[in-house]
Amino acid sequence: MTKTLRRTRKLSRPGRIVVSVGDRVEPETVIGFAGSRQVHRLRVHLDPDHFRSALLKREGDEVKQGEVLVEESHLFGLGVREYCSPADGVVERVDYEHGFLFIRERGVAVRALLPGRVVETVEMTAVVIEADGHSLRVAGGVGAARRGPVLLLGEGDDRLPPDTLEPAHAGQIVAWPGWVDREGLWAALRMGVAGLVVGGAPEGDLAQLRARVETLTPEEYLVAHCHPDLSAPERRPYQGEEWLGPTVMVTDGFGRVPMGRRVREVLGNLAGRAIYLSGGPAEPYAELILPPDVQLPAELPAEVRPGSLVGAFSPLQGLRVGRVLQVEFRPVLLETGQRVPAALVRFGDGEERWVPLANLRPVE
């Protein structure tokens, strides 16, 4: 059954919202611009009175790179001196006393990624979109929200060979039914893969990817990580985005965990169709949003509830059985440093530990 979902698209930093409540949006619709950290200071060699009369823009006005901001006539009108904007952006402040214009660069364009209707806007920070679709919650995720056509590669439960990925996969959501390690994650980064959906991945490898990409600049990406075939401007992945890497979704658990059969069937039937990925640290949980006409299997993993007897999988300790005391769907900070939905489980020896929900299976 198709559900009407409400999802919040947040700007990475306070900026400018450009849609209104009631607007229809498509995935590529720009809903706002995240604020930029880059502020340019333009020196204007005029006294305060002349500066005021010669200024063509005011605080809050949008400007284009090269646009004339100040135009001063001199030599009895025979000469004109112009001061032009150094970048696209907004006039943030005018200092008449000291002769400066401050231009904040236009921030990163944020797109809706979901087709639907705007039902709420939060000034300068977010837009709430109502859309039809199916939400499939997964174990966890790393990266920004992404949308792209999905492609299921392979059939086995094993590790993703790095050389499986190639430049032709740039901009796509690649699903692999097995698990991925550091080499596969770095290959996805190099090939410009928009998203990588896998059964499992070691938490340490995901943390390394997140730490690297969070500090990566576009220049560093092109030099150190981008495949040469993708370096041309028209083929560069992640253009105009702040997260310069693949969004990775782990469907079944952390470690060398394969993807569940029913989930891989769903993704296999979606070949070439666009899906939405969301599950970075700012999101309440990791999920895939699938098209509304998709037929989901009748049997997906059973829900874990307080009081449930569960088997808990750990790459180090194997399978242990315990009783669920508490369930948190909002991310919980684990001992490993990972933030994921988790349950507090009491094991047979009396130990109580938070375990990722994706690593738990009800025991009948």
Image (spheres, helix red, strand yellow):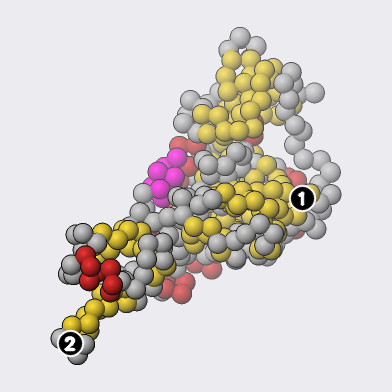
Does residue 311 belong to the magenta stretch?
no
Residue that mark 2 sits on: 76
Which secondary structure is most common in the magenta stretch? helix
Which quadrant of the structure image shows residue 324? top right
Q: Is residue 3 left or right of residue 97?
A: right
Q: Is residue 341 left or right of residue 333?
A: right
**Measured from the top left, where is residue 19 in percent x and y?**
59, 61
User: Tag 2: Cα neighbours inside 10 Å, few (<14), some, or many (≥20)?
Assistant: few
Q: Residue at x 51, y 38 (%)?
A: 202
Q: CA distance from mark 2 to mark 1?
A: 67 Å
Q: Nearer the viewer, residue 213 or 104?
A: 104
Q: Give above or below for 330 relative to 239.
A: above
Res. 272 visible in picture: yes
**Measured from the top left, where is residue 333 in percent x and y?**
51, 29
Q: Is residue 223 left or right of residue 336?
A: left
Q: Residue at x 80, y 58 (%)?
A: 293
Q: Nearer the viewer, residue 214 or 172?
A: 214
Q: Give above or below for 329 relative to 46.
A: above
Which quadrant of the structure image shows residue 240? bottom left
**Measured from the top left, where is residue 281 in percent x and y?**
51, 40
Q: Residue furthest bottom?
A: 78
Q: Residue at x 24, y 66 (%)?
A: 42
Q: Amino acid at mark 1?
A: Thr
Q: Amino acid at mark 2?
A: Phe
Residue that mark 1 sits on: 4
Residue 151 — which label? Answer: none
- Looking at the rendered structure, the number of numbered marks drawn on it comes to 2
Q: Which residues are magenta?
A: 207-214
